[in-house]
Image (tube, coloured by chain):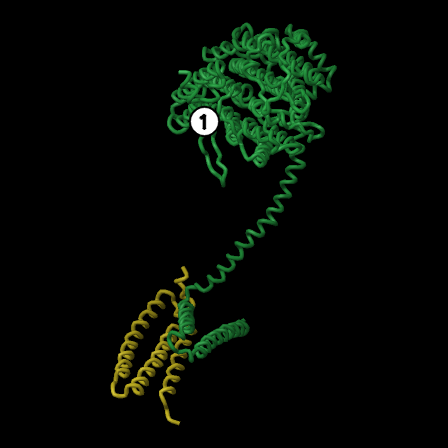
């Protein structure tokens, strides 16, 4: 059994779904961040797989993935800073308890 | 000049209305200016209606033709409703009486109500309300259709309500105003039903057209009689007839000039006027639909009961205004009784008391207004309304005493005064039509003479029993008294049996002209003799019992006739009976309806609203402020969108995967929710 595009796509979909599930259900803010990273990984696999199988000559997908990695690293930094501030204000990082938007 | 007055007859109505508006909106802060505007408006209206009156006497057809007019008020379906007016002889008479008494009363009020000039806007309010009343009353008598008549009818009710409740901070006045309004509403409801019945069958609201349609048979038989009786209900309410008379004596809580204008001379006469104006309809309602009575029998019955009952009550009252109020009720009963008098030939009814009733309405307006103004003068001087705290006022207030004596003589039927001739005409019609009512009316008239002279003797003769120093009022109050004493003495001469100018001016014209036997049979000396006897007996009794300033005999008599005395003093317990009826039936009924309201209607209404509140709360759960829930919403929505656009995106073959994804999402969430709960339960168990 050779590995085809579909296997990569299914893996990517599974990773993405795990990520989304993590985002939706995690209580801890940092876990949400980690889940986001998993979802990113799923997307990146998607891009690399497409690039490799559909247009083997170019590296567009791989370069996109590099960009995503850098941006997600920066984003993780910012997000962690936000979580720190939330913790400072609420003394908690349980995002179920942060429901200021209700008011 | 006369031509202008006739052709612009509507000005008579417009002027008081204008004055009421101006006072209300512009000059209410300036009491003296307000009162001047009001008096000026009514004075011009008086001059104009005098001119119209002169024109009517010389040529009534000219006036009828030239004074009429109409405005379209509104259209409903195919039917146009008009504000239309027409001056015929009764209207010409009524506008003269209304404007004259209104003017005199407004002049009188300037002094009588003088103490209120400096009390805020209340003096202006008084004059605005008087103007409003004059406008409504004039509107009522000007119109020739039921709709505007009904509007005027309600407007006089409102202005009467306002004026009775003028001293609204006094509880009794506020209560009396409410009572008057409610009692009137009871009658007005019947009136409205009558109007609707007539309109339904004839398709018109115009008096004359409706009468013609009825003559053609559009409305006949028992339903016509019922309509006429329903219309008469309005008159019962407005003219204080039995059994709705209870409001009129209480209406005396209003200022005395108001009582003179509204509750003696004009508004309460509206019922009589209305019945007379649509006599053509009443006269055709000959089918005996109500216990063997036709419409006019019913009118006569109510009038007869009212006349004798009110006279009986008036005999023992102690409040000067209450005596006059019951006297008014009784006199209105006389008029109604006369309106109900008729003779029949082969197939037609001929009202015989028509002219007499309006004649009595006309003369009564003068002397009753004057008597009320006299009582106002006395009350102004003595600061009490109890006749037993007056006495001997003739020496202190000679002009008031003399005018009051003239009024008393006139209402009692002293020969050659106004009341003598009109009462004669009334009795004359009764002896032609119904001997029983003749005897009844004679007894009531005797009582009238008795209680009016009792009033006069106790108030003006004998010794002064009050405190303080009563004295004559100023010219503004004296002038109306003196002025009104002239017609009270002399106006009757327009309608003597020998030369009945009044009878020629106001006659009943049947819709279908048929051969009418002329009743102008000259003087009936039996009637005249009776009416002289009535006066002598009534006056004699009053003189014996009260004439000499010694009331022992009167007290002895009241001891002997204790039952009758008490019944009369307590107004035949009408108020108590009504109170009992209201407490035990109306209020119980109201409570039952309240229960239905609460548990029937409210349940439905509140149920509907509660359902949506519940639904709203349910949906509100979605907006709980948690980021993750919103995100879930976004994802679900996205999936749904993709799902519904699968055709467009050409991914139909993945439809089922998307559905599967949604399903998994839900299942996971349910599992997570339940799992969380289980975990929490376990935690709670182990921790506690």
In the displayed orientation, state which residue is furthest to the right: B560
Vertical order, B617 against B467 (above or below): below
Give the x, y percent position of residue B658.
Answer: 43, 77
Give the x, y percent position of residue B327.
Answer: 61, 17
Q: Name the residue: 66% across, 22% down.
A: B300
Q: Is residue B74 visible?
A: yes
Residue where numbered disc 1 is placed: B69
In which quadrant will I find the N terminus of chain B? top left
Vertical order, A81 against A58 (above or below): above
Q: Which chain is yellow?
A: A
Between A69 and B103, the residue placed more toward the observer is: B103
In which quadrant will I find the C terminus of chain B? bottom right
Mark 1: give few (<14), some (14-19) or many (20+) Cα within 10 Å. Answer: some
Give the x, y percent position of residue B524.
Answer: 66, 9
Res B128 quadrant in image: top left
Looking at the rendered structure, the secondary structure element under dot 1 is strand
Q: Is residue A64 left or right of residue A13?
A: left
Res B43 quadrant in image: top left
Q: Colour of chain B?
A: green
Q: Name the residue: 37% across, 82% down.
A: A12
Between B107 and B47, the residue placed more toward the observer is: B47
Counting the numbered discs, the total is: 1
Q: Is residue B70 left or right of residue B248?
A: left
């Amino acid at each position: 059994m050779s590995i085809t595009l579909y296997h990569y796509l299914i893996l990517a979909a599974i990773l993405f779904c795990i990520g989304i599930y993590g985002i939706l259900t995690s209580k801890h803010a940092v876990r949400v961040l980690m889940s986001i990273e998993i979802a990113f990984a799923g997307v990146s696999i998607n891009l690399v797989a497409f690039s490799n199988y559909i247009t083997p000559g170019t590296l567009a997908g791989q370069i996109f993935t590099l960009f995503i990695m850098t941006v997600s690293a920066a984003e993780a930094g910012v997000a962690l800073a936000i979580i720190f501030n939330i913790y400072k204000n609420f003394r908690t990082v349980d995002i179920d308890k942060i429901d200021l938007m209700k008011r | 000049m006369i031509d202008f007055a006739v052709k612009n007859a509507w000005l008579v109505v417009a002027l008081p209305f204008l004055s009421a508006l101006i006072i209300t909106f512009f000059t209410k802060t300036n009491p003296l200016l307000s009162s001047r505007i009001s008096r000026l408006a009514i004075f011009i209206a008086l001059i104009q209606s005098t001119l119209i009156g002169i024109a009517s006497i010389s040529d009534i057809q000219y006036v009828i033709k030239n004074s009429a007019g109409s405005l379209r008020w509104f259209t409903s379906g195919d039917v146009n409703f008009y504000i239309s007016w027409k001056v015929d002889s009764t209207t010409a008479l009524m506008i003269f009486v209304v404007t004259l008494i209104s003017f005199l009363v407004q002049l009188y009020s300037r002094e009588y109500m003088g103490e209120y000039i400096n009390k805020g806007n209340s003096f202006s309010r008084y004059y605005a309300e008087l103007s409003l009343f004059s406008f409504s009353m004039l509107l009522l008598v000007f119109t020739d259709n039921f709709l505007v008549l009904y509007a005027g009818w309600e407007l006089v009710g409102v202005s009467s309500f306002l004026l009775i409740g003028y001293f609204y901070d006094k509880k009794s006045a506020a209560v009396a105003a409410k009572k008057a309004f409610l009692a009137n509403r009871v009658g007005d409801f019947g009136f409205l039903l009558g109007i609707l019945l007539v309109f339904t069958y004839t398709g018109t609201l115009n008096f004359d057209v409706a009468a013609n349609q009825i003559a053609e048979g559009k409305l006949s038989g028992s339903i016509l009689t019922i309509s006429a009786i329903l219309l008469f209900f309005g008159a019962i309410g407005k003219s204080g007839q039995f059994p709705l008379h209870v409001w009129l004596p209480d209406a005396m809580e209003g200022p005395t000039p108001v009582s003179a204008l509204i509750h003696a001379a004009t508004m309460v006469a509206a019922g009589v006027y209305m019945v007379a104006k649509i006599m053509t309809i009443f006269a055709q309602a000959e089918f005996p639909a109500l216990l063997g009575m036709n419409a006019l029998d019913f009118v006569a019955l109510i009038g007869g009961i009212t006349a004798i009952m009110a006279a009986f009550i008036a005999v023992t009252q102690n409040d000067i205004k209450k005596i006059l109020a019951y006297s008014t009720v009784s006199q209105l009963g006389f008029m109604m009784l006369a309106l109900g008098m008729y003779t029949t030939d082969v197939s037609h009814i001929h009202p015989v008391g028509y002219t007499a009733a309006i004649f009595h309405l006309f003369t009564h307006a003068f002397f009753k207004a004057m008597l009320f103004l006299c009582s106002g003068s006395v009350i102004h001087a003595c600061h009490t309304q109890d006749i037993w705290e007056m006495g001997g006022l003739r020496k202190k207030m000679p002009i008031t005493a003399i005018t009051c004596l003239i009024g008393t003589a006139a209402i009692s039927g002293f020969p050659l005064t106004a009341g003598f001739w009109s009462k004669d005409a009334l009795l004359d019609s009764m002896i032609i039509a119904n001997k029983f009512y003749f005897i009844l009316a004679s007894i009531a008239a005797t009582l009238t003479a008795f209680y009016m002279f009792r009033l006069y003797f106790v108030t003006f003769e004998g010794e002064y029993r009050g405190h303080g120093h009563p004295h004559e009022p100023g010219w503004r109050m004296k002038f109306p008294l003196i002025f009104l004493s002239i017609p009270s003495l002399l106006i009757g001469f327009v309608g003597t049996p020998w030369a009945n100018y009044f009878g020629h001016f106001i006659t009943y014209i049947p819709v279908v002209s048929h051969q009418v036997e002329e009743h102008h049979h000259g003087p009936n000396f039996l009637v005249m003799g009776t009416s002289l006897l009535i006066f002598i007996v009534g006056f004699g009794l009053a003189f014996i019992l009260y004439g000499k300033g010694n009331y022992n005999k009167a007290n002895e008599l009241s001891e002997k006739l204790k039952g009758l005395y008490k019944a009369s003093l307590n107004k035949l317990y009408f108020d108590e009976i009504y109170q009992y009826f209201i407490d035990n039936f109306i209020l119980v009924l109201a409570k039952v309806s309240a229960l239905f309201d609460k548990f029937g209607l409210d349940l439905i209404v509140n149920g509907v609203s509660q359902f949506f509140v519940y639904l709203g709360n349910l949906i509100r759960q979605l907006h709980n402020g948690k980021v993750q829930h919103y995100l879930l919403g976004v994802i679900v929505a996205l999936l749904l969108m993709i799902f519904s656009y699968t055709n467009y995106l050409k991914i139909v073959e993945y439809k089922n995967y998307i559905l599967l994804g949604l399903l998994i999402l839900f299942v996971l969430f349910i599992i997570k929710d339940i799992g969380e709960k289980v975990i929490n339960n376990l935690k709670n168990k182990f921790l506690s």
